[in-house]
Amino acid sequence: MRLWLLLWLTSTLLFGEWVLKPNYTFSDETIHSQDLIAAFPEAFVVLTIPNERLSHRVKAEELIALFKARGYEVRATHPLITFERHFGFDITPITQKLRAYYLTHYPSLQIDALHVRPRSYMAALPQEYTIEIPLKSYRQEKGTLYLQTPDKKRYFFNFELNASLKLLASSQLIKRHEKLTPFNTHSITKRFEGFIAPPLQALPQDRHLRAKIRLIEGRIITERDVEPMPLVLRGMSVNVRIRSAGMSLELRASAEDEGGLYDMITVKKSDGETLRARVVGPASVEIE
């Protein structure tokens, strides 16, 4: 039996299976085997991270090969191993603010990890600061924020979010101007990535929406793809209320246009006469 196999069998029995994690922190640029696997029986240098690096990525297969060359079998759950520099200060207030910021826009967001690191070396955080997150950063999974001190000095940080999100998608072909319902849409869970437009996370409870464009089956629906469902549709029978000199008259007519609340549309009476009226509710217009 080969020596390395004997070592692997013995070490597996003694220490269990050795697995490299996808993320590590470091303060010393020299990384040893026991920094990766605390219970590892032998200490040897695995890699040296350039001292100006705040983070460093290595292919898992390269680290596995180093262990194998010494007769040890390890495995990894991810193809890349990420090393993040550990700083001597607490960035929890920053990560908490960022977490709350994302959850405000995406209540269903499931955050797996949130990495925040300064763009340049810092010995400590300023004593007083406010956390400033640029507008529309919530549309991306990574970006830059800054701390601003009372004297307007800024300290920039990069951040990256690993998360998943429940989104609304079309479950079948939805034609233009077709109403969105639970029958033609469904919820899916997707890795959070950059969005050109904010995605819908669910059908709203307080209003009805329709498609502005043709939506193919399986499309993630964004705010750009939809519009409010008009209260009055073309060809709909509407109730017309006419107010004049303290008098009120009601009649039925047919809508010649579609319109939302307070839009002006044309309606046609049964005798063919057309009138201009203002939409005041579902299938309801008013003339003053």
Image (tube, rainbow, N blue to C red):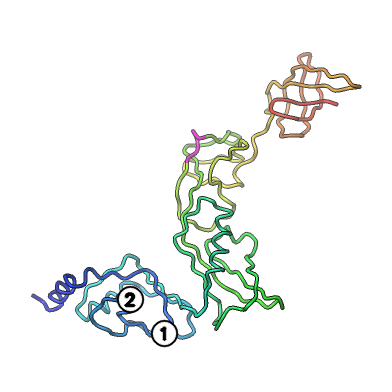
Q: Secondary structure at mark 2?
A: helix
Quarter holding the N terminus? Answer: bottom left
Q: Residue at x 58, y 54 (%)?
A: 104
Residue lying furthest front in this view? 127
Q: Position of residue 258 (x, y in %)?
A: 70, 30
- Of the numbered discs 1 and 2, the one sitting upstream in the chain is 1
Q: Main secondary structure of the magenta part?
A: loop
Range covered by the magenta-colored residues: 182-186
**Magenta stretch contains residue 29:** no
Residue to which mark 2 is pinned:
36
Q: Quadrant of residue 236?
A: top right
Q: Position of residue 160 (x, y in %)?
A: 51, 66
Q: Position of residue 73 (x, y in %)?
A: 22, 73
Amino acid found under the numbered disc labelled 2: Leu
Most distant residue in the left direction:
1
Q: Amino acid at mark 1?
A: Asp
Q: Is residue 69 above or below residue 80?
A: below
Q: How many marks?
A: 2
Q: Tell me, for residue 7, which label it has, or none.
A: none
Along the horizontal axis of the image, is 27 left or right of 250? left
Name which quarter of the figure residue 271 lies in: top right
Outermost residue, right side: 245
Question: Is residue 184 rendered magenta in the image?
Answer: yes
Q: Secondary structure at mark 1?
A: loop
Q: Residue furthest top?
A: 271
Q: In the figure, 64 relative to 211: above or below?
A: below
Q: Residue at x 77, y 27 (%)?
A: 266
Can you identify the residue that label 1 sits on? 28
